[in-house]
Image (cartoon, grey):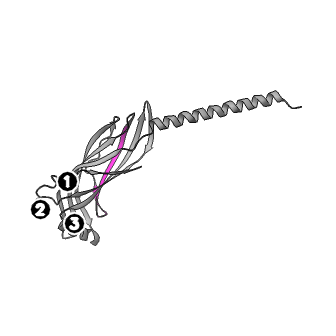
Amino acid sequence: MSNPSGADGCTRCCSKFCGLLFFAGFLVFDFWLIFRPRRIGASVDSASLTEFALSPSGALLFNLTADLSLRNPNSRIGVYYDRLDAAAFYSGALLGPADSPFPEFYQHPKTTTAVSAVFKGRTAGVGAGVSDAFGREKGEGAFRVEITVHAKLRYKVWFAKVHGFKPKVDCVVKLLPPPPTAVSSAAAFAPTKCSVDY
């Protein structure tokens, strides 16, 4: 014989379980809507070249300083910057990583932090494409340099810390030739907004 009371009990348990799952899903969705992190903002506030030359052997000699701003736009979420790796490129050629690594730091909600990077050294011999770009942009009076920052972040929501965010910051800046060709490489620099991809 069948047991209607047992079947009813099983149905009630399933209904309660489904209701709990729905409620938990609703809470998670609500939590995400309220606290979902917005991507960080970044810009290059100033940058200058004190050396940028092409040697007879085809190597690029460079000395570049850049001041960047990193912005946490979130009103309830803090950001831990666990790692920041900066590099500079010219016409696709790697100039090099920053001379000194950025320090780790915590950024409170709705705050901006300034960091500085120095790139100094010389490349190996560059190809004809880079040499052509150098000659052309020197004649135009401005060099286009790309600065990238690979970051490793954690977001802090209340007491919880969420891992796994690795955005890439990409900044393309136009720099005047270094003195004495230009009166001041930094004076005419226009602050440049960077793209941030997660």
Q: Residue at x 32, y 42 (%)?
A: 71
The residue singled out by tag 1 in the image is 189
Q: Residue at x 66, y 32 (%)?
A: 17
**Residue 8 lies in what quarter of the image?**
top right
Going by the picture, which residue comes out furthest to the right?
1
Tell me the magenta residue range. Answer: 79-96
Q: Earlier in the sequence, mark 2 or mark 1?
A: 2
- Measure the C-alpha gap from mark 2 to mark 1: 15 Å
Which circle, 2 or 1, is nearer the viewer?
1
Is residue 19 toward the left or the right of residue 90 in the image? right
- Where is residue 165 drawn, in percent x and y? 42, 45
- Measure the C-alpha gap from mark 3 to mark 1: 16 Å
- Where is residue 164 drawn, in percent x and y? 45, 44
- Where is residue 122 drawn, in percent x and y? 23, 61
Q: Earlier in the sequence, mark 3 or mark 1?
A: 3
- Where is residue 198 drawn, in percent x and y? 42, 49
Q: Is residue 95 magenta?
A: yes
Q: Is residue 72 above or below residue 1?
A: below
